[in-house]
Image: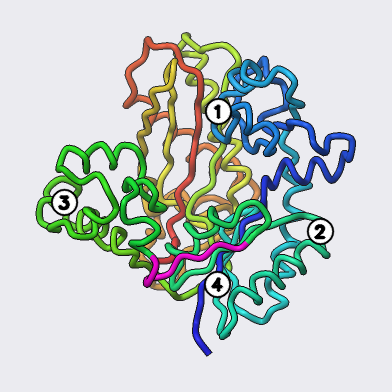
Amino acid sequence: MSHWVLHVDMDQFLAAVEQLRHPELRGKPVVVGGDGDPTKRGVVSTASYEAREFGVHSGLPLRTAAKRCPDCVFLPVEADVYNEVSARVMAVLRETGCPVEVLGWDEAFIGAATDDPESFARGLAADVKAATDLDCSVGIGDNKLQAKIATSFGKPAGVGWLTTSTWFDVLGDRPPDAIWGIGAKTVAKLAALGITTVRQLAAADPAPLAKEFGPTTGPWLVLLGNGRGESEVDSTAYVPRSHGREVTYQRNLADWTEIAAEIARLARQVAAEVTDRPVARIVVKVRYAPFITITHGTSLPPDERLPPGSHPPAGGQLALDGPLARTGPENGGERWAATFERAAEAALAMFTPGRPVRLLGVRAEFADNPE
């Protein structure tokens, strides 16, 4: 039997879940995003197909979505609900016995050994439909890159193909951003080098691209142009590399004292939520009005990286004479929060005050991330 990679993508997932919960919304333009109030700042998480006909799409500001489609029904993001439905979908995929690599709420790769991948894909979609009453599309390819792109050819509720043998027939004359992982900025730089199609990218000399994009990214783009990608589906449970919180404010913040207080509050919130893994770095994110985003980070000293109740391993590299070793469990949580706050404050000091701010965020980057 041949080995195939399948990409399963739930169609209009969040909107479809809401239409399932609220049958009266079926066939109507539905937008899920923020707290469901289009007069506030926020972006579209998912738009139903009916809303997409009006130019509403993921990432669009809610206010713009309301202008494009005044009749849209706006709903808040209900993460707990989507988590529960997503778990049911992934359980169906795992029941095949094939390796499943989860990419998010609504999509996953599956590695399948079969001589009839299309029948396998259609059976899988039918099983998901039976278990959840939701539709999904499935892409079939020789590797993850091809399968991911192929899914778009099957939407909605269908099966798409893209393999090494059909790669150039399907994508050869399309612009490079037809490839998963290539965005508008990269397309502009490639165009400046005279590369405007996937076929041209595949035939490009890696040296000029390495000079423009870097020694790793440049040659990697050529591989993408040839449809090359990973074919092994990794079923290992996803381990987050960081955890953070951010807030979009309904009015711009101009007072730097208020901004500093908000950063301190977010840092302590993140500290309260990160208590089971060591943290190497605290990163502060500032989005100035209208949409310029800048980040700065501060590394934690080795003796301040372990969460409350943890102890450095015997013979480990974390210092034993720092604040952690001297802190007892009764005040470990406060010590941990104070560490995050100090690091966030140091990161915030790297920013230039005086400009109005619309979003603030604090992120903890874990020290034990897998290579």
Of badges 3 and 4, the one in the foreground is 3
| Three-letter code for the amino acid on which mark 4 is drawn | Thr
Check if mark 3's residue and mark 4's residue have beta carbons within 8 Å. no
Q: Is residue 275 left or right of residue 84?
A: left
161 is within the stretch colored magenta: yes
Q: Earlier in the sequence, mark 3 or mark 4?
A: 3
Q: Earlier in the sequence, mark 4 or mark 1?
A: 1
Q: Residues within 10 Å of mark 1 (few under 14, many from 20)?
A: some
Q: Which residue is mark 3?
A: 209
Considering the whole magenta stretch, tell me its main secondary structure. Answer: loop
Residue 153 in the image: x percent, y percent? 54, 55
Q: Which residue is mark 4?
A: 236
106 is within the stretch colored magenta: no
Q: Secondary structure at mark 1?
A: loop
Q: Which residue is mark 1?
A: 60
How far apart are the two marked residues, 4 and 1, measured between alpha carbons?
33 Å
Region in magenta: 159-166
The front one of 230 and 150 is: 150
Q: Earlier in the sequence, mark 1 or mark 3?
A: 1
Compared with 132, 249 (above or below) is above
Q: Secondary structure at mark 3?
A: helix
Compared with 263, 320 (above or below) is below
Q: Secondary structure at mark 4?
A: loop
Residue at point 43%, 41% (across, down): 282
How far apart are the two marked residues, 2 and 3, measured between alpha carbons?
46 Å
Rendered image: mark on residue 132: 2
